[in-house]
Amino acid sequence: MKPVVSVVMAAKNYARFLPEAVTSVSAQTFTAWELLIIDDGSTDHTAEAVQPFLADRRLRYLRSDTLGQARAKNLGVRLSRGQFIAFLDADDAWEPTKLEKQLALLAAQPAVGVVFCGRSLMDEASRPLPRQPMDDPPRGFVLPQLITQNFVCFSSCVVKREVFARVGAFDPQWDLAIDYDFWLRVAQFYAFEYVAEPLVRYRTGHGNLSKKLRDRVDTALAILHRAETRYGLRAVVPSPILAAGYASTCQTLGYTLRASEPVAALQWYTRALRWPALRYRSVKGIVASLWAVIRGQRTAAWPENATVNL
């Protein structure tokens, strides 16, 4: 039977997490799914970790040769058969009712192209982490809001297949923040909807956060610039909002680094001054970073809920 929703999971060296992710798909209350696991050149025991699950004919495993995450996900989309496509990173997991609740929204609202949901946090050992209260993200046609904040958790989204036909696939030019580039294209044509429940368990604390975040911010700035100049955002998004997007991306990294690396934070807040939008936040950040430098502050503090255009 043809699946209704295809779940694409690109995995590389996440064998220790993958069984939890796959099990969370198998436990879905909505059962008309297929799962495509694209093993992107793993050097750990990913193949062995997948093996016990292959008895379920809804699951397909394909070994690729280090395509990179954009090409690996695009391969999964091309091989998929469902009317809807969901993405789950191999180090995350879902709650059992995730697909059921999101597909109900898609069925009820034809203008919606993407449904995402809330998330809870877990550590490397799958232990729950405290979840700070957060306001519900924007819904509907959210392009202006996406300029200043990428609020769509990638492992939470379900996307109509027609969206890829209209806006294209993930761009292999980007190794990081591929979802941000994609959402900027999608939001020009489709509405976004949100399930206000933490239906994704998002794993954190198992990577080089400082290096990754710097790289992601540089990539996000480049993506935003290309969207402005090539995707026609200048014609549909007011210039103050575009400026706020550049500034807030730099400010978020400054805020994240302020406690642990105040000199680096100072540089990012200063960079944000290039754009007049939100300048008061940049000035406040500069003052706080200077004070941290004077005090010799070097305490590690990574706010796990900090959101940037990643």
Image (tube, rainbow, N blue to C red):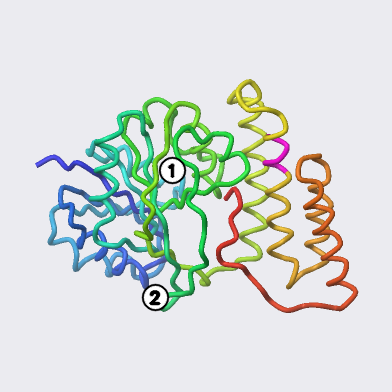
x and y percent of residue 160 in the render? Answer: 32, 35
Residue drawn at x 66%, y 26% is 229
User: Where residue 145 appears, x then y in whole percent?
Assistant: 57, 39
- Count of labels in the image: 2
Q: Is residue 229 above or below residue 280?
A: above
In the image, 190 versus 11, the foreground residue is: 190
Q: Secondary structure at mark 2?
A: loop
Measuring from the top left, give residue 9's x and y in whole percent. Answer: 34, 53
Q: Amino acid at mark 2?
A: Ser
- Identify which residue, 269 or 195, lies in the foreground: 195
Q: Residue at x 34, y 59 (%)?
A: 199
* Number of other residues with Cα within 10 Å of mark 2, as a class: few under 14, some 14 to 19, many 20 or more: some
Residue furthest toward the right?
294
Q: Residue at x 65, y 54 (%)?
A: 215
Q: CA distance from mark 1 to mark 2?
A: 28 Å
Upstream in the sequence, badge 1 or badge 2?
A: 1
Residue at x 59% of width, y 48% of height: 309
The residue where tag 2 is placed is 126
Mark identifier at residue 71: 1
As rendered, which of 185 and 289 lies closer to the eye?
289
299 sits left or right of 53 in the view: right
Q: Is residue 40 above or below residue 274?
A: below
Q: Mark 1 is on which residue type?
A: Arg
Asked if residue 221 lies in the magenta stretch, the reply is no
Q: Which mark is residue 20?
A: none
Which residue lies most toward the top here?
A: 235
Magenta-span inclusion, residue 243: yes
Part of the protein shown in magenta: 242-246
Residue 179 placement (x, y as % from top left): 49, 44
